[in-house]
């Protein structure tokens, strides 16, 4: 089973500068040359679900009518993502300003542009209703995320990557089957990781180089170890994780097996620069994922 995934989310052109360190408030820092690459949490996760996760993946998002949109469509299409349902709206394609320090740590500011104008239409809702897994993040309007969750078929999973973290309405919390967050997002959303389970049945908390932990109601937490790698750029590593997690679930793997492959995808992604440009192949993920404990 190849599994069908619909990713509902943002697409941005990433304007990336390597910096000796991230600037403090009011400070100017001289960086390296400017790089321009396809990004956006939604588009990154769609690329990962298709290319690294091997799932039949559709992307539902909004782009402007500009060169940034072309860059994104080429990247999504090149990874095998279905883009027929991407909306074109009267606003510039989203832009993310990304700085990356020598340790590979990033800082990102997003100007949402077209992402803010995303609305679900009937065709998109139909595609969602056909998927085994619907995956969303929080760089698009919250009502669209909530509608996407509601449009899934009975038995399909709604996976929410609550990034960037923001307050969520009760109806969205109630729709989540699996929540994916990092430690900061977990603290923002619930105070403690365990408290996430008051809201959702399953939470996967990523821990950077330390791997991740799966939290489930009435079960002991399961820690999945990190894989030692040389960190070049952490941008989009969480997206590679989420895309492969969704794809693996859609292909019928259980949460633990899917999370191990997701961890491998995230580890491989940090060894390469960029977001979509850093997404590993499905073969690489399978090879490394087999070694994750
Ligand atoms: O998660 C990384 C992504 O966050 C970047 O590609 C940037 O566009 C922002 O959406």
Image: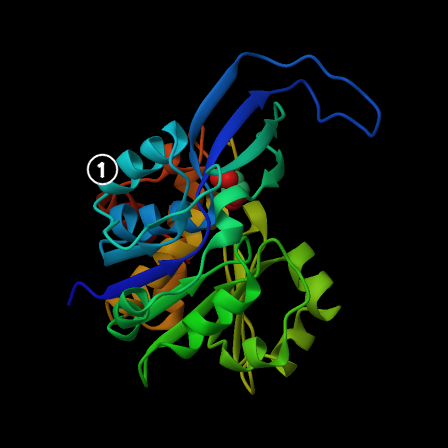
State the residue in front, 267 or 225.
267
Image position, residue 239 (x, y; %): 45, 49
Q: Residue at x 59, y 53 (%)?
A: 207
Q: Is residue 35 left or right of residue 79?
A: right
Question: Which residue in the structure is indicated by mark 1?
Answer: 78
Q: Is residue 286 above or below residue 5?
A: above
Image position, residue 247 (x, y; %): 30, 60
Say which element carries label 1: helix
Q: Is residue 282 left or right of residue 140?
A: left
Mark 1 CB near ligand 1 (8 Å cut):
no
Q: Residue at x 57, y 21 (%)?
A: 17
Residue 220 appearing in the image: no
Q: Residue at x 59, y 40 (%)?
A: 110
Q: Is residue 82 left or right of residue 141?
A: left
Image position, residue 117 (x, y; %): 49, 53
Q: Residue furthest right?
A: 26
Q: Is residue 9 above or below residue 80?
A: below
State the residue in front, 171 or 164.
171
Q: Residue furthest front?
A: 90
- For the C terminus, the quadrant is bottom left
Image position, residue 12 (x, y; %): 47, 39
Q: Residue at x 69, y 76 (%)?
A: 195
State the residue in front, 8 or 180.
8
Q: Is residue 233 left or right of residue 249?
A: right
Residue 158 appearing in the image: yes
- For the N terminus, the quadrant is bottom left
């Amino acid at each position: 089973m190849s599994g069908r995934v619909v990713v509902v989310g943002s697409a941005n052109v990433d304007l990336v500068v390597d910096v000796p360190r991230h600037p403090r408030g009011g400070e100017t820092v001289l960086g390296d040359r400017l790089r321009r690459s396809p990004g956006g949490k939604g588009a990154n996760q769609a690329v990962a679900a298709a290319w690294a996760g091997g799932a039949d993946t559709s992307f539902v998002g909004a782009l402007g009518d500009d060169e940034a949109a072309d860059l994104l469509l080429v990247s999504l299409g090149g990874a095998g993502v279905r883009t027929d349902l991407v909306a074109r709206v009267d606003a510039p394609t989203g832009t993310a300003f990304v700085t990356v320090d020598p340790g590979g740590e990033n800082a990102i500011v997003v100007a949402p542009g077209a992402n803010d104008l995303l609305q679900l239409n009937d065709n998109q809702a139909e595609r969602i209703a056909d998927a085994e897994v619907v995956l969303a993040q929080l760089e698009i309007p919250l009502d669209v995320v909530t509608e996407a969750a509601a449009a899934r078929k009975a038995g399909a999973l709604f996976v929410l990557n609550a990034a960037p973290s923001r307050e969520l309405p009760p109806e969205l919390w109630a729709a989540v089957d699996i929540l994916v967050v990092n430690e900061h997002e977990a603290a923002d959303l619930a105070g403690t990781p365990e408290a996430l389970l008051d809201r959702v049945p399953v939470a996967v908390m990523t821990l950077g180089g330390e791997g991740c932990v799966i939290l489930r109601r009435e079960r002991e937490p399961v820690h999945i170890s990190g894989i030692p790698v040389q960190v070049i750029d952490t941008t989009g590593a969480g997206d590679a994780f989420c895309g492969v997690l969704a794809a693996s679930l859609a292909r019928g793997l259980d949460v633990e097996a899917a999370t191990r492959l997701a961890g491998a995808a995230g580890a491989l992604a940090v060894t390469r620069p960029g977001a979509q440009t850093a997404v590993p192949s499905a073969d690489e993920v399978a090879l490394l994922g087999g070694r994750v404990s």
